[in-house]
Image: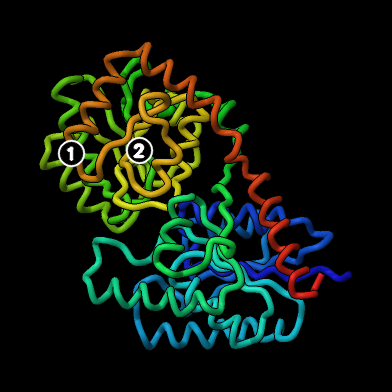
Amino acid sequence: MSRVPVIHIITKLEFGGAQQNTLHTVAHLDDRYFDPLLIAGPGGYLMETAREMGIRVTVARNMERPLNPFRDARAFRELVRLLEPYRGRPAIVHTHSSKAGILGRWAAHKTQVPVIVHSIHGFGFTPQQTPPLRWFLREAEIRTSGITDHFIAVSQSNRADGIRYGLFKAEQCTVIRSGFDLVAFKDAGSARDELQSELGIGPDTPLVLMVACLKPQKSPLDFAQVAALVRKEVPEARFLLAGDGELKDALLREVDRLGLKGYFFVPGWREDVPRLMRCSQVVVLTSRWEGLPRVIPQAKAVGRPVVATAVDGSVEAVREGIDGYLCSPGDIKTMADRVVLLLKDQDRALRMGRAGSLAVDEWDQDTMVRKQEALYERLLKEKGLW
């Protein structure tokens, strides 16, 4: 049989787990059976990376994250045009993220692409939105679920929420973990020399690390407030938030307000995350909602304990008191107390880090791709297309 086109659609190739997973999947699908294409909105930190990986990328120039009825209508028409060549052919459209998930699935439906899959990396309707906006986005997801053949969730929590929201039945959703390169993290060296020369962080200085996009979901200002409390107990500690995004200016103002200048560093996106984790003592994540953040199993793979908020899939990735601690979202004091405990009790931190390093095999990125391929094959067979 001829290769089956698999068109992945994502809103923007910013630096994040969903985007990195999508790139790895598109680049590593078995090319004996699948012919992958990636459609993404313009820009994004990983756009050049995608092209360097040899991925065929088509830019949907009108697709952007903010809601804009006129531009969204143009984006929909653009996606319809891009999918028109697949009308009536055995093909799969696989969407990611909220905007691309809605527009991409309806464009696939309009062009009669026979198999439509959507990956849930958390939901687009969140507690921080106004009630009317949250209702609108939830209704859009419910209506779009009716034209979706199958869903992939990165966590059991997201799968359970989708069932509860009425988006799909249990048999319509498969959990496939958000994979990453386990070897790169398990075998990572330290970045201490670079941190000393770039930021003045000495070889023996306790370092607390967070890796996240600077957006409301990740609540980076909470990390700054955690850092301020930790410094009262461990004055020599330093804090690094590797990431960038819309809240960067607000974060830097908060750092100044809290008197953390010279102790709290925001170097932007870093390509050496495994090495940063290796030279940290604790990895923190202050998210208000999640799918299942890869940073948690990544930290565990490096052998570092995690202090994270007990939201969504994070609860599945952290074993309380064994390889990390979970705290309520926004509970700055408890998070700070847990970080201080791990900084002061090095034996505990090492013991928890070792425990975490033994429980990460399910996050292997190649296992993730093979499971998606098996799902594609099953869905095609069910429609008599394989």
Q: Helix or strand or loop: what does disc 1 sit on?
A: helix
Which label belongs to residue 225?
1
- Quadrant position of residue 26: bottom right
Q: Earlier in the sequence, mark 2 or mark 1?
A: 2
What is the three-letter code of the residue carrying label 1?
Answer: Gln
Q: Is residue 346 above or below residue 127?
A: above
* Residue at the extreme top of the image, as rendered: 347
- Quadrant position of residue 238: top left
Q: Nearer the viewer, residue 351 or 184?
A: 351
Residue 348 visible in image: yes
Whole-number angstrom distance, CA of label 2 to CA of label 1: 13 Å
- Quadrant position of residue 378: bottom right
* Spot occupied by residue 70 in the image (x, y as percentages of width and height): 38, 88
Query: Left or right: 28 with respect to 147?
Result: right
Residue that label 2 marks:
210
What's the coloring here? rainbow
